[in-house]
Image (cartoon, coloured by chain):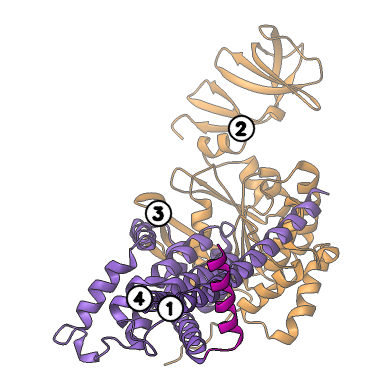
């Protein structure tokens, strides 16, 4: 127990004194997570809107696929993406093997079904006829999309935070696609593996502590947003009841 | 190439349906629908549940493509659907959002939204959260934002649905005057004949997959063109008469009279607020009439006279 406390103390010390390698890894991890989530959101939110709004069998089928994508083991995606990026493979011409762009691509692909499924689910909870009514009053497609995202904002934000959280914590795909090259393609989560294999438990603990802080901050933001939404709904319901 | 903007003249229809076929999924709901909506008029569409009233409104409003025929619009058409579907923001912001969708410049929206709310006596709700409104207030706001658009043609789908009687009566009174403002053409899908009486210049009855009556309410309600339309419009009594004719009767056409020429047996009685609605079997038909409380018992014999009604050839 004493050993554990000492190790945590040393890890905190390393964080507080701004170990440059640790800072660089943290920055890279956050940059990767935010960039891949932004791309996934840009591509996935319109699709989620389309699927959430529609009632056809094809759209329901697509939602089932997106939901299934939530359970896709990152390692599976990592293996196939790594193979596709090998020289001579369809994406080999990009020369992305063991590079940051490959990591962005992997994390975007992992976040994409998450964003699609959660945005579609959020849009399905909108009041009946809201979007059709806006169309009946002349709203363009862009305005309808803006209205849907605004009204379903809690669900959309949940999707964003879930995507960020999974990107920050991702190990399997990062190691396979990015190679976990120290100083180039390693992230906080994957560095834990490097540090442990290099017999540096203090470094691994520091990585874990920063990861925990990031995840806690993201979770905190999500909780605040959800509680604000819920309490504004409760206030509205109380006013209606009186 | 940019199309010329539509020219709206006072005389011509703002909206015209030509041989319209309306479907829901693969099911054909309405066929051969022809109608014109003119400036300054209020046209009420009545029909039983499931006949396709709301689907027709969606087609006329451009929200759905017709399966056949065409809709000619010579002005801008707005449709207020049945569910108020207000966004999670204040009432004022909801009306302003509708104005934004309609293309009204930002600077003009607050004043126009406020005026529309005031016109429907909903100004005091402007700062309230839309999700905090009662059903009646939500409908009032929904109607106000539809009127705020100042469309050339306004299509309203059951604007009084689901309201309790006093709220409905209040909104009906306010709507009756608000709908008369300006020279907009208005089409109302309604469920209740009384609402049509209160609001409409012309009445269109949809039955059995098509338009079965079209004309001023008094004309259609007093002289329906067929037995089916008459029955839908509340002619609940039916008597077979000599010469192969059928007389359709509303309860108001049947009077309890001890000296009356007809005698019948009370089959059913439904107590109401102002009397008792009795269903009476006669030798050649069945009629309904209202009598004061307590009214005759079931199985009792009553004497009646007929005072009005509409005659049809039996096959009509």
Q: Are marks 2 and 1 on the same chain?
A: no
Mark 1 or 3, which is nearer the eye? Answer: 1
Structural distance between the alpha carbons of marks 2 and 3:
29 Å
Q: Can you tell which chain is drawn purple?
A: A
Q: Are marks 1 and 4 on the same chain?
A: yes
Mark 2 or 3, which is nearer the eye? Answer: 3
**Residue placed under numbered mark 3 in the picture:** B23
Provide the residue span drawn in magenta.
A1-19
Q: Crowding at label 2, few (<14), some or many (≥20) Cα neighbours within 10 Å?
A: many
**Residue placed under numbered mark 4 in the picture:** A197
Q: Crowding at label 4, few (<14), some or many (≥20) Cα neighbours within 10 Å?
A: few
Callout 4 secondary element: helix
Mark 2 or 1, which is nearer the eye? Answer: 1
Q: Is residue B172 above or below residue A167?
A: above
**Residue placed under numbered mark 1 in the picture:** A200
Structural distance between the alpha carbons of marks 1 and 3:
71 Å
């Amino acid at each position: 127990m004493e050993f554990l406390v000492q190790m945590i103390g040393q890890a905190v010390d390393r964080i507080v004194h701004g170990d440059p390698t640790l800072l660089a890894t943290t920055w890279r991890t956050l940059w990767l997570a935010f960039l891949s989530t932004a791309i996934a959101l840009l591509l996935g939110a319109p699709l989620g809107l389309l699927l959430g709004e529609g009632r056809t069998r094809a759209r329901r089928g697509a939602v089932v696929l997106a939901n299934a994508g939530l359970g896709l083991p990152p390692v599976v995606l990592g293996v196939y993406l790594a193979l596709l990026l090998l020289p001579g493979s369809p994406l080999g011409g990009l020369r992305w093997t063991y590079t940051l762009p490959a990591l962005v691509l992997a994390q975007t692909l992992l976040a994409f079904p998450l964003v699609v499924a959660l945005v579609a689910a959020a849009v399905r909870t909108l009041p009946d006829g809201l979007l059709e009514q806006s169309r009946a009053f002349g709203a363009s497609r862009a305005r309808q999309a803006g209205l849907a995202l605004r009204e379903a904002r809690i669900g959309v934000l949940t999707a964003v935070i879930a995507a960020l959280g999974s990107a920050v914590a991702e190990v399997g795909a990062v190691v396979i696609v990015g190679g976990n090259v120290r100083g180039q393609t390693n992230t906080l989560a994957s560095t834990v593996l490097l540090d442990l294999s290099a017999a540096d438990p203090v470094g691994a603990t520091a990585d874990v502590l920063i990861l925990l802080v990031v995840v806690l901050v993201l979770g905190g933001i999500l909780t605040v947003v959800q509680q604000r939404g819920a309490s504004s709904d409760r206030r509205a319901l109380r006013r209606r009841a009186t | 190439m940019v199309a010329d903007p539509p020219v709206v003249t006072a005389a011509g229809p703002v909206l015209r349906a030509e041989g319209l076929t309306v479907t829901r999924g693969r099911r054909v709901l309405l066929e051969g629908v022809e109608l014109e909506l003119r400036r300054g008029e209020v046209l009420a569409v009545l029909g039983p549940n499931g006949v396709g009233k709301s689907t027709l409104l969606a087609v006329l409003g451009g929200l759905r493509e017709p399966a056949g025929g065409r809709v000619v619009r010579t002005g801008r058409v707005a449709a207020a659907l049945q569910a108020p579907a207000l966004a999670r923001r204040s009432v004022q912001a909801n009306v302003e959002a509708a104005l934004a969708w309609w293309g009204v410049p930002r600077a003009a929206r607050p004043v126009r939204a406020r005026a529309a709310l005031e016109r429907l006596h909903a100004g005091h709700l402007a700062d309230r959260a839309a999700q905090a409104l009662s059903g009646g207030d939500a409908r009032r706001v929904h109607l106000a934002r539809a009127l705020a658009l100042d469309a050339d043609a306004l299509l309203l789908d059951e604007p009084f649905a689901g309201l309790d009687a006093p709220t409905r009566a209040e909104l009906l009174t306010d709507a009756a005057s608000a709908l008369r403002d300006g020279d907009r053409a208005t089409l109302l899908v309604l469920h209740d004949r009384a609402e049509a009486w209160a609001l409409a210049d012309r009445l269109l009855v949809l039955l059995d997959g098509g338009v079965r009556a079209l004309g001023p309410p008094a004309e259609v309600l007093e002289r329906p063109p067929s037995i089916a339309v008459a029955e839908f419009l509340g002619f609940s009594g039916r008597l077979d008469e000599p010469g192969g004719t059928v007389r359709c009767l509303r309860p108001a056409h049947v009077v309890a009279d001890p000296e009356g020429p007809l005698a019948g047996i009370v089959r059913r009685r439904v107590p109401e607020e102002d009397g008792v609605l009795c269903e009476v079997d006669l030798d050649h038909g069945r009629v309904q009439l209202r009598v004061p409380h307590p009214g005759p018992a079931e199985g009792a014999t009553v004497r009646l006279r007929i005072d009005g009604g509409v005659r049809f050839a039996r096959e009509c």
